[in-house]
Image (tube, grey):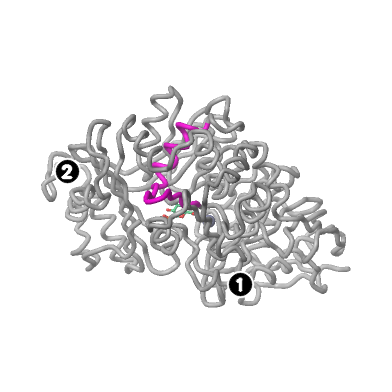
Amino acid sequence: MTPQTVSTTPIEGQKPGTSGLRKKTRVFMRPGYLENFVQSVFDAIGGAEGKTFVVGGDGRFFNRAAIQTILRMAAANGAARAIVGRDGLLSTPAASHLIRLNGTDGGLILSASHNPGGENADFGIKFNTPNGGPAPEGVTNGIFRRTTEIDRYLILDTDDIDLSSPGEHALGGMTVAVVDPVADYEALMETLFDFDALRALFAGGFTMRFDAMHAITGPYATAILERTLGAPVGTVINGTPSEDFGGGHPDPNPVWAKPLMDEMMGAEAPDFGAASDGDGDRNMIVGRGTYVTPSDSLAVLAANAHLAPGYADGLAGVARSMPTSAAADRVAEAMGIACYETPTGWKFFGTLLDAGKATLCGEESAGTGSNHVREKDGLWAVLLWLNILAKRGMPVAEIMADHWARYGRNYYSRHDYEAVPVEAANTLMSDLRAALPDLPGRAFAGMTVKKADEFAYRDPVDGSLSEGQGLRLWFEGGARGVLRLSGTGTDGATLRVYLEQYAGPEEDHGRDAQEALAGVRDAVAEAARIEALLGRSAPDVVT
Ligand code: G1P
Ligand code: ZN
């Protein structure tokens, strides 16, 4: 079978510095659009000849067609083998695991994460390197450069491969291995967690609700929680992946997972609730009557991870993204282990994990993970929580109260201003950036600025420098505000304002978070002139 060489012209591709390409689905469906990106990946990594790739996605609209195209292109580019999840399905952490487990040359993961799916919604693709993690900037910049100069792509003219059952198929000179998307991932989880203790937990009547949000973790959660660990059928809800996620927004937070939140705050609440996002890398943790912020979750997991067999020897270190609260820092300090503060985005954890400097990582945006893969992992976080609950034998609310009594509480919330005109958002950031040196000592809404800067990060492993990673304002009295523009929004600009207020071990930990943060919220709004520059008096999304 002779590969066809199709001539093409450069695409408006991946933004430099971002780990993947995310666009409206219809853009991806334009002739040659997906093909240009995929060919640019192969070209940028020195060709696909003789290589093995993992290919899979979260099942959103266009997933199936895109996978068939990628397989034809990989074969035309001389790849030896492609490992594909059955029906083209793989959660992002499971894909990361397969890339590592099989010693492959990387993988192409199809997803727009927590963004809605469908013909009129979002689609995305990214390349992960052989370590299983999102490609680092050197690689993504190479891919980006290639998309600006590409003039041809290679593809086979063949029928679709049948991906509906495990087995091997020949595609030109390439072998396509269709695998069960769950099996290897589940085997990995079994090495990390005490499955016997979890079985005993459920057998003892412990109740749980896992909302898969019509997305990829449905099959994973059903297999592990219900089939293997014996949780009753119905523990997993919205467990069948649909192409448009049931018309919803598969983002596991109190806003988009409101039905789960309502159940957990109600009279009939189960003991434990959790949710995951479109591609399975994010998580939400909620106990009966108690929402756990992702920042607090990271801190609690760090403090208790040794209760799970995979972490019984302790942690090498903890890493968190800069806007994530400092709750984990206090745990790391008490345990005498390193704590790293990285820019937003999972890729920055990769070097720390590879170098053995950090074991657990987390972001305020509901991403938590460890060195078991090189992506954040939603179901992993849920299983670690279950393992901790099984060993400590107390409800989530008590675990939180106990944690705060020991370390103090970092009240935390993120306020998002979405679909803001790009120019207005840029002006706000550049005005505030220019004002930073004059802010210390000045008071806004009654709060005095102690320190202000723009976050830059020098990777302690590879020495690379990432600048312009967010504006930070610390106030007297233990408050911090951070402002940055989203790199993943697809509509105008999104301004994210991250608010934090520390209350020490002896202080009140029972306040409403938004109320505890009202002071720093007003101070940041005034310092950054949010209302004047954006014309918005309140954020669109509060999480
Ligand atoms: C958002 C989150 C960030 C996460 C990324 C990918 O990026 O804030 O923590 O790593 O999605 O899931 P942002 O839109 O803020 O650039
Ligand atoms: Zn995701």
**Residue ID for mark 2:** 438
Magenta segment: does it hold 287?
yes
For the residue marked with disc 2, what is the amino acid? Asp
For residue 371, above or below residue 238: above
Q: Nearer the viewer, residue 420 or 403?
A: 403
**Residue ID for mark 1:** 61
For residue 26, above or below residue 141: below
Q: Nearer the viewer, residue 321 or 431?
A: 321
Q: Is residue 226 left or right of residue 73?
A: left
Residue 148 horizontal/vertical position (percent): 57, 63
Q: Earlier in the sequence, mark 2 or mark 1?
A: 1
Quadrant containing the N terminus is bottom right
**Helix, strand or loop status at disc 1:** loop
Residue 10 horizontal/vertical position (percent): 59, 68
Residue 312 horizontal/vertical position (percent): 57, 27
* Quadrant of the rendered image containing residue 329: top left
Q: Residue at x 39, y 42 (%)?
A: 296
